[in-house]
Image (cartoon, rainbow, N blue to C red):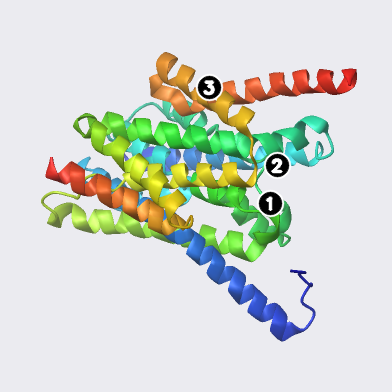
Amino acid sequence: MPSISYLVAVLAIVFTLTLALRAVPFAVLGRLRDSAVVTRLAVWMPVGILAVLAVTALHGTLTTEPRGRWCALLAVAVTVGTHLAFGRRTIVSVGAGTAVYVLLLNAL
Amino acid sequence: MEQHTPTHPAIAASTRRTRISQGVRDSFSAGLGIFPLGIALGLLITQAGLPWWLAPALSLAAFAGSLELLLVGMLASVTPLAAVALTVFVVNFRHVFYAFSFPLHLVRHPVARAYAVYAMIDEVYAVNAALPERERSAARLLAMQIACETYWVGGGLAGVVLGAALPAPVHGLEFALCALFTVLTLDAFRSRRELPSLLLAGASVTVALVLTPGTALFTALLLFVGLLLVRHAVTGREAAHA
């Protein structure tokens, strides 16, 4: 059982490092606003970062529930299909995909 | 349609209300992933034999889901602080890249600005990066952030309470996070047809998953930024030749 002082030290480290990683880039970028690299990266990055997050989140799901591999892939297809077919309403698409995954996984 | 800057206080107030409700609505689909994940965190903390208050304390200190889930095991086994610090650094390093396209310039008030930076989580970044510029606003952004933090802390507390009562939790709810990022990728691709970026990201994440499956997100983002810098250099040279 960890001591209170250990837990408090961890909380301090977690808070300081996470906030610094979120804040410092803004301070640096403020001075680079007009540079061509920053302007281009701001346009190029979002789609790619989102795709990376989607793939790593799927990979995480596949690793935690290896027997639900096909359920997860099917649920991604349902999510994409729902989104493109029913007017791009995020909550509907996410809800449909998640419902399919949970139902299939718990039925296994 | 032309958008006018509201001058009358009543109009300004109603615009503000609309924006706040937009932000809260943005948070619903994210909340579908955040709240169950919070419950999972609370359950894990109680199962590891750690004190219950660690769930809200950790959630307020970090406000970063994947990191907190990872830390529970490390805390239970009293991992050295240096190793904890390194883990925090590696897992949360991705936030460095969000600054490039996070609409912080919309937030004027210093306290609100500080909060917006502190609460810049994946889901908030993702939703706001996918929004067209004219639909963004400070009120909408902050409302979503406050709502998300409420789901996260609330989920953790619910998990702690459920920890003793629930015989078996519902499996698979964390898929909502994966579905959300998938949908947001589709939306971001529609508003900016950036096929080269998508292909470079695909290549980066594939290489990262093969070489470093344990820290795939970190490696993939580093590779992706490297490839974009190469692309910038190549595009710059082509523009100079033209």
**Where is residue B213 drawn, in percent x and y?**
39, 21
Q: Amino acid at mark 1?
A: Leu
Circle 3: residue type: Ser
Decide: is B206 above or below B186: above
Q: Visible in this render: residue B65?
A: yes
Q: Residue at x 52, y 42 (%)?
A: B185
* Mark 3 residue element: helix
Is B107 positioned to the left or the right of B170 in the image?
A: right
Q: Chain of mark 2?
A: A
* Mark 2 surroundings: few (<14), some (14-19) or many (≥20) residues within 10 A: many
Q: Quadrant of the C terminus of chain B?
A: top right
Marks 3 and 1, the one that precedes in the sequence? 1
Q: Say which residue label 2 marks.
A: A26
Q: Nearer the viewer, residue B235 or B176?
A: B235
Which label sits in the foreground, 3 or 1? 3
Crowdedness of circle 3 by 10 Å Cα count: few (<14), some, many (20+)?
Answer: many
At x 40%, y 36%, the residue is A57
Which residue, given by chain and number where applicable, does mark 3 sit on? Answer: B204
Is circle 2 on the same chain as circle 3?
no
Front position among marks 2 and 3: 3
Labels 2, 1: front one = 1
Q: Chain of mark 1?
A: B
Q: Work out how far the residue at label 2 is from the one at label 3, CA to CA, in angstroms.
A: 25 Å
Residue identifier under label 1: B104
C-beta proximity under 8 Å, tags 2 and 3: no
